[in-house]
Image (cartoon, rainbow, N blue to C red):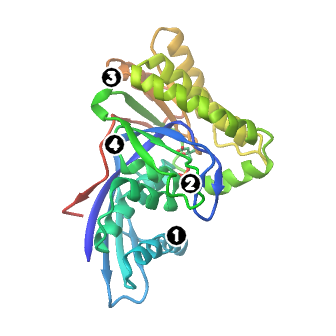
Amino acid sequence: MQATALAHSNIALVKYWGKKDTALNIPAVGSISITLDALWTKTSVQFDAMLKDDVLELNDEDATDKETIRVSRFLDLVREAAGIKECARIQSKNNFPTSAGLASSASAFAALALAATNAAGLDFPGTKLSEMARKGSGSAARSIFGGYVEMSKGSKPDGSDAIARQIASADHWPLILLIAVTSEAKKKTGSTDGMELSRLTSPYYTPWVESSPADMQEMRQAIAEKDYSKLGTLSEFSALKMHALAIASDPGLLYWNGTTVEGMHLVRSLRQKGHEAYFTIDAGPQLKVLCQPDEADIISNALENLEGVKRVIRTGIGGDARLNEEF
Ligand code: PMV
């Protein structure tokens, strides 16, 4: 009744923001991401009849009550599917600093879904794992798969078709993502609360949802044709559109700091000089920059030299979530 799994983080090129169903965690829009090779979570789950409660350890430390409750609720879904009642000991670690505000819920819930279902004796195919991971965190549904991944918003009320699938493998087109870390502080408003606030208060919410299918179609095409300018331009547009939606919420959600803004200007000035870099930003202050492999050094140096950037993490495109023998 024990299993260990590894899952990579991912970055959305066409962003997800907003839920159609909060209880089942069904997204209001589709999204398209790349899986990130250099950033991963490894998680071990052991169901044990002797335990009275689930016990969670994160990065070698006891987890907070809030973290443990979130994981326990997720494990309840696995226990229900497997018809078991045992509590579990869960150990999880990221190979990147959790405090840096880098998306860790995507890799965390993908690794947990794979390890927990396996430890419970279930052998789920990727689609079912993706549906399960989505209930932990929407972006986690995408981290089940490597390469270029599309998450569908689905149309069924039970969420069984709100799942991710790979649309191109990592080898199809090797791109690089540079993550400029601008703050190590934890974000103030998590994505779930932020999305609900935007849905309820932002005047841009309906146009955001309505304009999503066209972005999805254009990004699918950019990936199929390996049209880098199109992919980059659309990634930057989708990120800015998501932040415009968030900023227009009441009270406005402002995830950027000064360095994030300076970084956006830097990326655009690099482009004017002929270096094709494009930025994207999630619900936090880190600036993520897309580039082609032959330009990664020059763009990484420019980001490192920007005042306020603490460090730059470089990653290529990674593979599927997988079972692992060792924790
Ligand atoms: O699924 P969550 O709660 O990790 O939300 C993801 C939200 C963004 O990272 C901002 C966008 C995305 O599609 O990953």
Nearer to us of marks 4 and 3 is 4
Q: Which residue is mark 4?
A: 146
Q: What distance separates the C-alpha of mark 4 from that of mark 3?
A: 18 Å
Which residue is most to the left? Answer: 325
Nearer to us of marks 1 and 4 is 4
Q: What distance separates the C-alpha of mark 2 from that of mark 4?
A: 27 Å
Q: Which residue is mark 3?
A: 293
Q: What distance separates the C-alpha of mark 2 from that of mark 3?
A: 31 Å
Residue type indicated by callout 3 = Pro
Asked if disc 2 and disc 3 are in contact, CB closer than 8 Å, the reply is no
In percent of width and height, residue 230 lies at: 50, 19
Nearer to us of marks 1 and 2 is 1
Name the secondary structure under disc 3: helix
Which residue is most to the front? Answer: 156
In percent of width and height, residue 214 lies at: 60, 29
In percent of width and height, residue 200 lies at: 78, 52
Choose the circle earlier in sequence order: 2 or 3.
2
Q: Which residue is mark 1?
A: 70
Residue type indicated by callout 1 = Arg
Figure quadrant of the C terminus: bottom left
